[in-house]
Amino acid sequence: GAVVSQHPSRVICKSGTSVKIECRSLDFQATTMFWYRQFPKQSLMLMATSNEGSKATYEQGVEKDKFLINHASLTLSTLTVTSAHPEDSSFYICSVKGDRDYEQYFGPGTRLTVT
Amino acid sequence: GQNIDQPTEMTATEGAIVQINCTYQTSGFNGLFWYQQHAGEAPTFLSYNVLDGLEEKGRFSSFLSRSKGYSYLLLKELQMKDSASYLCASMDSNYQLIWGAGTKLIIKP
């Protein structure tokens, strides 16, 4: 399967600032990537589906102007949380869609804390 | 609507067997997944069932009944390192994963 990395693994930022999270597919050409958010003791929630070279598809209730996704290459997708607030504090996880429709390979996640 | 149900928490003894149940309702079905998630880490893939029956992989087995919308994960010869959350996820007709909230498994010596 694909090896997926995320950077940073942890980030603390002040309320009102923006933070960028990178998701890299190290050994696989990632046409499609997914961004998830997980609050403590809750399930993963899909935020958006990112396709290389086109606009991301956001799930209902996810503000596209707040969570900016850029998937400019087959190895990198970025999620930028703009004007972050404490309620945006969460565990953000990306995944890469594999060759088969049912395959997903997860990154290690990024813990965002907004103070 | 789409819904995944699994117990919130289970406790078992080292060396024993534990079965974690999951029921699902999704729009279409393209398979049932089990993932293991340690605290503060991303999920890691354990199993994938798309046909009815039992799939065995070492100490872990997964069962699916599509007619009942039911799956279970069976863990044998439990080890302390198996203490984690176990996430059940169903893939819907759009190949999107619908996740359960996870079952926290506590292993006691």
Image (spheres, coloured by chain):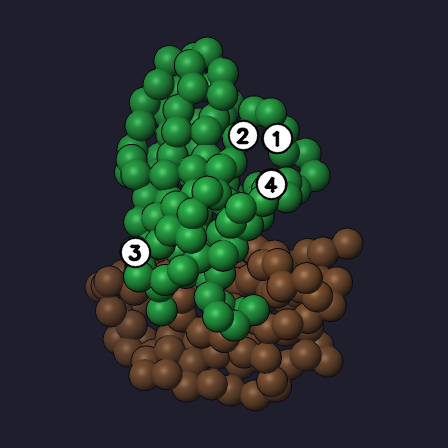
Give the residue pinned by disc 2.
Answer: A67
Q: What color does chain A have in the rendering?
A: green
- Residue A99 pos. (x, y %): 48, 70
Question: Circles 2 and 4: CB distance less than 8 Å?
Answer: no
Give the residue pinned by disc 1.
Answer: A64
- Amino acid type at image mark 2: Phe
- Amino acid type at image mark 3: Leu
- Looking at marks 2 and 4 on the same chain, the residue that comes earlier in the sequence is marked by 4
- Amino acid type at image mark 1: Lys
Question: Circles 2 and 1: CB distance less than 8 Å?
Answer: yes
Residue at the location (61% across, 30% down)?
A: A64
Give the residue pinned by disc 3.
Answer: A26
Question: Circles 4 and 1: CB distance less than 8 Å?
Answer: no
Classify 10 Å Cα crowding around label 1: few (below 14), some (14-19), many (20 and above): some
Residue at the location (38% across, 34% down)?
A: A21
Q: CA distance from mark 2 to mark 1?
A: 5 Å
Classify 10 Å Cα crowding around label 3: few (below 14), some (14-19), many (20 and above): some
Residue A55, numbered label: 4
Classify 10 Å Cα crowding around label 2: few (below 14), some (14-19), many (20 and above): many
Do the residues at discs 2 and 3 belong to one chain? Answer: yes
Q: CA distance from mark 3 to mark 4?
A: 22 Å
- Amino acid type at image mark 4: Lys
Q: CA distance from mark 2 to mark 3?
A: 24 Å
Q: Is residue A75 above or below residue B27?
A: above
